[in-house]
Every structure is written in structure tokens, then in C-alpha cells.
Amino acid sequence: MKNLMVTGGAGFIGANFVHHMLGKYDGYRVVVFDKLTYAGNLDNLLPVKDDPRYAFIQGDICDAEAVDAAIEAHDIDTIVNFAAETHVDRSILDPDAFVQTSVYGTYVLLEAAKKHGLERYHQISTDEVYGDIPEGYSSVESDALRPRSPYAASKASADLMVQAYHITYGLPITITRGSNNIGPYQYPEKVVPLFTTNAMDDKPLPLYGDGRQKREYQYVGDHCSAIDLVLHKGVIGDVYNIGTGVEVENIDMVKILLDTVDKPHDLIRHVTDRAGHDRRYSLNIGKILALGWEPDHTPEEAIAKSVAWYRDNEWWWRKVRNEDFESYYQVQYGKRLAS
Ligand code: NAD
Ligand code: TYD
């Protein structure tokens, strides 16, 4: 493995992964292949812009010719696929692009990996494919997939297709299923950057329902080091959960967030819940721990460090919270916050 194609590498986790790989290894070349949807942002890749080991191609993973051309031009031996539509609330408003990118786009990448005989195809998946998890249980990799939102269903479909290509064609694949990532460069539709940037402008924080939903908030750098480990030491054909093993209720996450930016707790507004909101995700992470990984941050440290990044990097998020973002915000929160 030396020439990586990182699809979706201009997004939040993909860009952090590019920084992780180029920072840690000298011998890799990284090609980011990204459509630059609303969530893709070349500012996320500014620190590597002039690195001779890095190249950027604007392209859609649904476009087989463009994918082929990129693989050939850069002698790609490994694809790490981060490309997806990723926001549950947007998938409720309009699922079309979710199905296009995660279902058809993943299929296009798998065909390309097969055709070019790549050494590895790695799929970035999510804990949301397991669905809502009852108290007292944590999902293991062999569990049935029970996705409940259009986003989660599009990701579960992709996982199944990736596994089918391994079983049917012997394609050398691995899959990682991460929990809620937080950290630098996350588009502010997701809860931590949304609430931090709202708080900094003294705007209300729209907390869905009672705010007692549970998530495993994970620092993005920890997720990237686990993906790196699976690429190097993971068993071909296997799936690895990557979480923290520690659940945090949203309401507690928000209190840490507000304390970090020194804003009052009365900015919290309980608003109408998300349709079909999964109450709890919980991953059994025994398999990735046994492979030799451990996270560097507790969830509390991850939340405080992520919030501090937005506090200190207004240059980044003020550009992103543009007119398009504000129209989305109005559709998603206008009525909720008015009532
Ligand atoms: P993101 O929305 O920040 O970035 C997605 C990137 O994919 C963007 O740069 C976008 O331009 C690109 N993209 C979208 N459609 C494309 C297409 N058709 N062709 C090429 N590029 C396309 O997402 P993220 O939060 O960085 O998530 C990355 C991956 O990790 C996704 O697969 C997501 O399902 C998964 N994941 C995310 C989380 C999380 O908490 N954010 C947790 C677990 C897994
Ligand atoms: P989010 O960041 O959208 O990630 P996911 O839905 O993929 O877990 O949301 C994280 C949690 O925060 C989830 O339980 C929904 C909740 N949430 C709110 O309460 N208000 C909001 O405005 C958003 C975006 C999320």
C-alpha cells in the first residue's frame, strides 16, 4: 500500500485522515477524490495544499470513467471511501442524494477496485447501521443491520454491497463502523459545531426532544488512527467497530460545550424531536482494542477540545455558515424555534 485514493477527503473525517496519514508516514501518496458538495471544503486541506505527496481531483464517485481515470493516472493501489451524504436530518428532508452516493457510488468504486485489482478497498461506515440499541446491550460486528433513517439505510446498503464483493469476487475489503465523530473541520449542521457556533453568537441551541439520547462522542483523530491500524493490521473481509465504549447524553454534552465557551445554560431550547430519532447507539469495541488500538481522548476531553477548535477558528466556520447554510437552518429550525 503506497498510493491511496481518499474519496470524500475534502469532508470532515476524510480531511482529518489525510492529515493523519501524511503527518505520520513519509512513504504514502494521497489523492483526494471529492465532488465538493456543500460539505466538501478545500479549506480543510489547506495544510497539505503544497505537499508534493498530495493531489486533489474534483469528481463524483458515481462517475465510473472519472474514477477509472484517477486510479490509472495515480497508480492507485488502495481506496478508502469516506464519500457519502452524511446528515440524518437532511436525509429525512431529501434522501435522493444519499441513495445515489452511498448505494450507486459505492458500487462504482467496488467495480473499479475489482477491475484494477486493487490491494485494498476500505469502507468507512457508521454505528447507525445497527439501529436503535436497547439499554444493556452493545453492538458487535456480526449483528444484523437494522438501520432506521434514510442515511443509516444508505450506509447499511453500502456495507452489504462491500461484503458481497468480498464473498463473491474475493475483493480484499475491510469495513470500519465509527461512532459520532467530533473535531476540526466538521460542517456545522452536526450538533457539536452547530451548537458551538450558535453559542458564540448567543443564539439558542435547538436540543431535540428531552436531550437524553445517548451517543459515543469520539475525537476524530482517534477514529483516524483506528482506520490506519485496520488498513495495516486488519483481517481482510472483516468489520471493526470504532467507538469509545462510553455513552454521553446529549444534554450533558451540551453543558460541557457551553462551559467551554463560557456561555449560559439557558441558551438550551428543547425543540420538536427528529422523526424516528435513534435513542441510543452503543458499540462493543473489543475487536479493535484487541487489534492494538486505544483512544487518546475521553469523550469529555473530545468535546472540550472540539469546541475549543471552533472557538479559536472563526475564520473557518464564518465562511461555511453562508447564505446556503442559513437557508437550510431556516427550513430545519425556523418553525421548531418559533413554537
Ligand atoms: P462530510 O459530510 O463532512 O463529508 C463528506 C464528503 O464526501 C464531502 O467532502 C463531500 O463533498 C464528499 N462527497 C459527497 N458525495 C460525493 C460523491 N458522490 N462523490 C465524491 N465525493 C462526494 O462527512 P464526514 O462526517 O466526514 O463523514 C465521512 C464518512 O464517515 C461518511 O461515509 C460517513 O457516513 C462516515 N461516518 C461519519 C461519522 C460522523 O460522526 N461524522 C461517524 C461514522 C461514520
Ligand atoms: P448529529 O450530530 O446530527 O449526529 P447523528 O444524528 O448522526 O448522531 O446529532 C447528534 C445528536 O444530537 C443526535 O442525538 C441528535 C441530536 N441533535 C440535536 O438535539 N439537535 C440538533 O440540532 C442536531 C443537529 C442534533
Image (cartoon, rainbow, N blue to C red):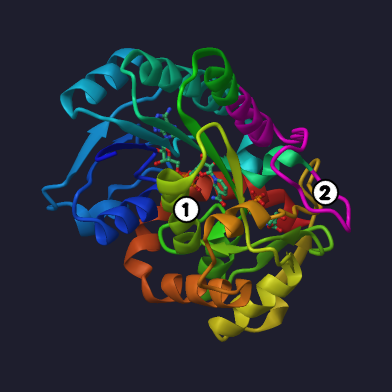
The amino acid pointed to by label 2 is Ile
Distance of label 1 from label 2 (alpha carbons): 26 Å
Helix, strand or loop for disc 1: loop
Q: For residue 7, which quarter of the picture?
A: top left
Please state, as top left, top right, bottom left or bottom right, where the N terminus lies in the image: top left
- Identify which residue is drawn at 50% across, 72% down: 296
Q: Is residue 155 magenta?
A: yes
Expressed as whole percent of the image width and height from the top left, the position of residue 50 reads: 12, 53
Mark carried by residue 187: 1
Q: What segment is highlighted magenta in the picture?
A: 132-160
Q: Is residue 228 magenta?
A: no
Disc 2 crowd, CA 10 A, few/some/many (<14, 14-19, 20+): some
In front here: 270 or 221? 221
Residue 317 placement, left or right of 272 = left
- Identify which residue is drawn at 31% across, 21% down: 67
Mark carried by residue 133: 2
In front here: 290 or 197? 290
The amino acid pointed to by label 1 is Tyr
The answer to whether one can see residue 85 in this image is no
User: Do the residues bearing badges 1 and 2 touch, measured as CB atoms within 8 Å?
Assistant: no
Expressed as whole percent of the image width and height from the top left, the position of residue 56 reads: 22, 38
- Of badges 1 and 2, nearer the viewer stands 2
**Mark 1 near ligand 1 (CB under 8 Å)?**
yes
- Identify which residue is drawn at 50% across, 56% down: 223
130 shown above or below 270? above
Give the total number of marks visible in the rendering.
2
